[in-house]
Image (tube, grey):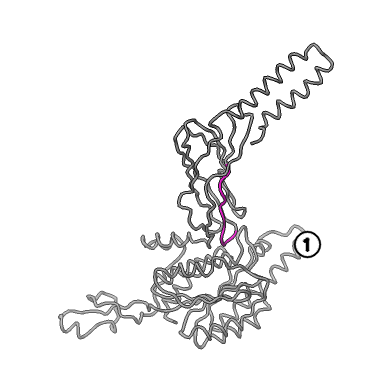
Amino acid sequence: MKPSRRTLGVLALLALSALVVAFFPATELVWVVVALGFLVALVGDAVAGGWRAPLEFERVELEALPLDAWTEITVDLSNPNDGAVTVELFDGVPGTMETEDLPRPVTLAAASRARIVYRVRPQRRGRAIFEPAHLLRRSRLGLWTLVQRAGDAQEVLVLPNFRPIVRYALLAVANRLEQMGIRKKPRRGMGKSFHQLREYREGDLLQQIDWKATARRHELISREYQEERDQQVVFLLDCGQRMRSVDGATSHFDHCLNAVLLLSYVALRQGDSVALMTFAGEERWLPPVKGAHGVQRVLDTIFDLEATDAPSDYSEAARRVLTLQRKRSLVVWLTNLRGEDASEVLPAVATLRQRHVSLVASLREARVDAFLEEEPRGFEDAITAGAAAAYCEEREGVVAALRSAGARALDLRAPELPVALANEYLDVKSSGVL
């Protein structure tokens, strides 16, 4: 408990008035009466019952939070006492999160409860601790303040942004994937996996007709095929120093984790399995997983990963993939390529070519594109724009060389990555190259 600003203001005023008393002794009695009256009020306000009685605090269903996305947090504040109270609520939000709508003044009647909602936006993945809440209490006359702790500390996981998964699932149910930017291209070939027999439809190929079934039923019957299931996607995640580049509030590495999460969900929903391997720093290997719990396995593997200062060794990563993943797979490289990487990444992709299909996604910095889009205002701006153009030209050369070597390659900004990868995966599925 400590004096409030109101008390400190009155004490300062009394101190100044004491100087007046020194020059005008006749006012001394008035000053003493006022000072004694304030002292009595100060003591009485401190010992008055009720305003310091403890309150109950509880967070409602605090679950995992997505990185760099606003999420509502709901808390209950209860007053089990006989008198009304007014408090200012400060929840114990971790320092790695931004907040909105805090602190919050709350007035509680006797034996009542209030539900408070505020928002947080996590800025770092991993484990975070919500400390007990701070309740700023004021005495009835406002002469004293008291900070109380309420509730328990709670641990929460900050995960890669999983909200695109929820949106994808809802749109998929409504068959409106194009609203998210994910498009299903017409198949250029016919799937090899038999699905069912059905009546012949105009446009069916001759080789689809099942002549035995047609003879039995005396009408044309076609075989219907579906895209191959039980194929495998292997994510090859670069944890090297270039992945620490930041566009806006989110690093390239975190954008890659978001993309891994979305494409994992898409692939698992298609009946395929997913695996993940990291390189350039901490090395992790998640063997192929399949089914409804596959996304959770991926989350458990990547939620606390961080980019490191280590260089990226593409050849070593390719050798590890060949050792750990025998079945033919779509290997998705997530990295940031420069012109000087061609001598390393091209042999690495060639190493995988006989057994796997490679999709190389290289993230470029948004600031580089901004240099090219801005009109130069002077000599230095022109030099910067020229350097940016040369940099992009080198990157385009690497991407073109990868495509010539038989790999699929993307060079795009980080926010475009999740949807672009999903589209490339669906294109690979429809083309039958796996």
Above or below, 166 against 237 in this view is: above
Q: Residue at x 58, y 48 (%)?
A: 92
Above or below, 251 against 137 in this view is: below
Q: Nearer the viewer, residue 240 or 302?
A: 302
Q: Nearer the viewer, residue 49 or 19?
A: 49
Residue at the extreme top: 26
Q: Position of residue 161 (x, y in %)?
A: 52, 61
Relative placement, left or right, of 283 versus 227 is right
Q: Which residue is mark 1?
A: 380
What stretch of residues is rendered in magenta?
A: 124-134
Residue at the extreme bottom: 354
Q: Position of residue 91 (x, y in %)?
A: 56, 46
Relative placement, left or right, of 213 versus 434 is left
Q: Residue at x 66, y 83 (%)?
A: 343
Residue 157 lies in the magenta stretch: no
Q: Nearer the viewer, residue 77 or 399?
A: 77
Q: Position of residue 371 (x, y in %)?
A: 68, 62
Q: The N terminus is located in which quarter?
A: top right
Q: Position of residue 48 (x, y in %)?
A: 57, 28
